[in-house]
Image (spheres, helix red, strand yellow):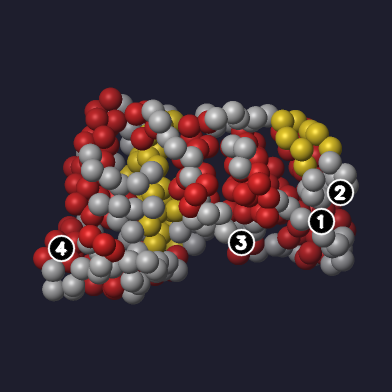
Amino acid sequence: MHFRPFFFTFLFLPFLSATAYAMSWDEAIKAVEAKSERYFEIADSMNAGFLGSALNEVGVSRHRCSILGRMLNKQAISAHLDVPEYKQPSSGQEFLVEGQSLANWAYQARYIKALPISRRVRIWNSECVGHLKIPTSARIQEKTKEAFYDVEGDTLHIFGPITEGYHDRLTAALDAYPEIKFVALGSDGGDVREALLAGVEIRQRGLDTLLQNPCYSACPLVFLGGVERQIWSPYPDLGFHKVYGRGGLTVPLESSIYKLIYEYIDAMGADPKLTLAFMLSAEPKEMHMPTLTYLCRANVATWIQRACTSEEFR
């Protein structure tokens, strides 16, 4: 696969005309940052006040997948996420919102540009494919064994499905990097048994977990393994559904697997009744995403940036 990570053609970004114009990523980032600053200045001159924390992450998920699509030669699939042409903002609040959206685009572009291609692929697969109208067929095959994880300082980043051997691969990675203090997660889910083993491994080592990409199905069980369980802006989804077996058939509630999950949740310090209720709220082909407040209330997350802490509900 051929990648063009540094140069692209913008067709509809708001700081350019509709005429195609080639720019480097550095040039594009600087141009977007400049326009964001101008919008904030205009909003200030109109006495717009403050944006409010609810809009701090405006456009982030859309921007990330748009940028990744361009960097990974998936533009034909992600083009609908590109920033469209729009009318000039007319109120101070509109200038604030657009300015924040542009600032978020620039921040995401700068961050993603600095990542190795392997990490970009992992984020694309876990956060974009199957979401935001990007088909599952857009998944990019990861070919190297090292693709299971990346290490950044004292943080182990793990992405991808929870398949057979997940716990063993996690153990090997942690053994190879004894300085690890945090395990950052993102996954579409997978095998419940592997997830439980991984969660226990994380807890036995006294590590914390971070949610930095969407975490679905069996992935929240791994997340629960952290001593402290943190969710950072822009608040990736934490999704639950019922356990299913072969053929996608729902496992009956009377099954011993639910008793095992209940006991695991309880041992990890979360509310087993409320957390299990999250799982039972959606069929296998659906997904239940509790609000940030409920994730804190159930002690699934112990701290959520600018939102809540589990301490508030004790």
Q: How many marks?
A: 4
Instruction: Judge whether 146 appears above or below 57 on screen.
Output: above
Residue type at the position of mark 2? Ala
Q: Sequence-wise, which precedes: disc 2 or disc 3?
A: 2
Residue type at the position of mark 4? Ile
Q: Give the x, y percent position of residue 258.
A: 17, 66
Q: Sequence-wise, which precedes: disc 1 or disc 4?
A: 1
For discs 3 and 4, the disc positioned in front in the rendered view = 4
Q: Sequence-wise, which precedes: disc 1 or disc 2?
A: 2
Q: Give the x, y percent position of residue 200.
A: 19, 47
Question: Which residue, given by chain and number where applicable, does mark 2 sit on?
Answer: 18
Question: Which residue, given by chain and number where applicable, does mark 4 sit on?
Answer: 257
| Local crowd size for mark 2, using a 10 Å CA cut-off: few (<14), some (14–19), many (≥20) | few
Residue type at the position of mark 3? Ser
Question: Which residue, given by chain and number where applicable, does mark 3 sit on?
Answer: 53
Between the C-alphas of marks 3 and 4, the distance is: 40 Å
Residue type at the position of mark 1? Glu
Between the C-alphas of marks 4 and 2, the distance is: 56 Å
Kindly check if marks 1 and 2 are in contact, taking CB atoms under 8 A apart as contact.
yes
